[in-house]
Amino acid sequence: MKRLIVMYCTLLPTIFLTACSVSYGFQGGKLNYDVVKTITIQDFPNRATLVNPNLAPTFERALRDRFVEQTRLTAVNNNADIEIEGEITGYDIMGTAVKEDAYASQTRLTVGIRVSYTNHKEDGSDVNQTFTAFREFPATSSLTDVEDALISEIVKEIVDMVYNATVANW
């Protein structure tokens, strides 16, 4: 009996540890790093009707940082294996959530950015798409009070969408 108890006390923890193991893995995305090594991110001209002068450089910097930090690509100025270019197509403000007195209680800031992703080394992986994101804020706040924070959030979301649509394996 004593031997049986010792055997259970020895085997049970071993069985639980091996049976309950969890394995995480990251697939690394769609890029073949044996072929693709460099990236160029061009300037994104602001062609929206309303223009925020900080939007284009903020977006370009965030996009460049994301690709350099999350991939093994090296940023170069020209002749890259991957080229990303585009333009800011929308920067719109509109009232939403109309109250019973016909005034908006929320205001929505929407940003649209057209992105052209060209992989010169791997056929069939090019993307040409417009990405849009928005944030709402109380109509009692002025845009100038909340604009920088909203742009930061919107840019992060659009950069995530661009990254996922082009090189992430989602």
Image: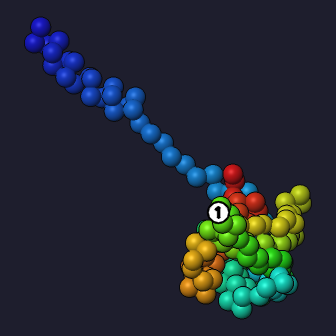
Residue 147 is at least partly visible in this image: yes
> Where is mark 1, residue-wise?
99
- The part of the image, by quadrant, that contains residue 145 is bottom right
146 up-or-down from 160: above or below: below
Say which residue appears at 22% left-offset and 18% top-offset. Answer: 8
Q: Position of residue 84 (x, y in %)?
A: 80, 75
**At numbered mark 1, what does the secondary structure look like: helix, strand or loop?**
loop
In the rendered view of the protein, which quadrant contains the N terminus? top left
Q: Residue furthest front?
A: 101
Say which residue appears at 27% left-offset and 23% top-offset. Answer: 12
Answer left or right for 105 relative to 119.
Answer: left
Between 99 and 110, the one lying in front of the other is: 99
Residue 33 is at least partly visible in this image: no
Between 53 and 63, the one lying in front of the other is: 53
- Please rate how many residues cluster around mark 1, counting C-alpha atoms within 10 Å: few if below 14, some from 14 to 19, many from 20: few
Inspect the image, locate mark 1, and give the three-letter code of the amino acid beneath it: Lys
Q: Residue furthest left?
A: 2
Q: Residue furthest top?
A: 1
159 up-or-down from 47: above or below: above
Q: Residue furthest bottom?
A: 53
Say which residue appears at 84% left-offset and 60% top-offset. Answer: 125
Answer left or right for 37 relative to 48.
Answer: left
Q: Position of residue 142 (x, y in %)?
A: 60, 83
Between 41 and 131, the one lying in front of the other is: 131
Q: Position of residue 168 (x, y in %)?
A: 69, 58
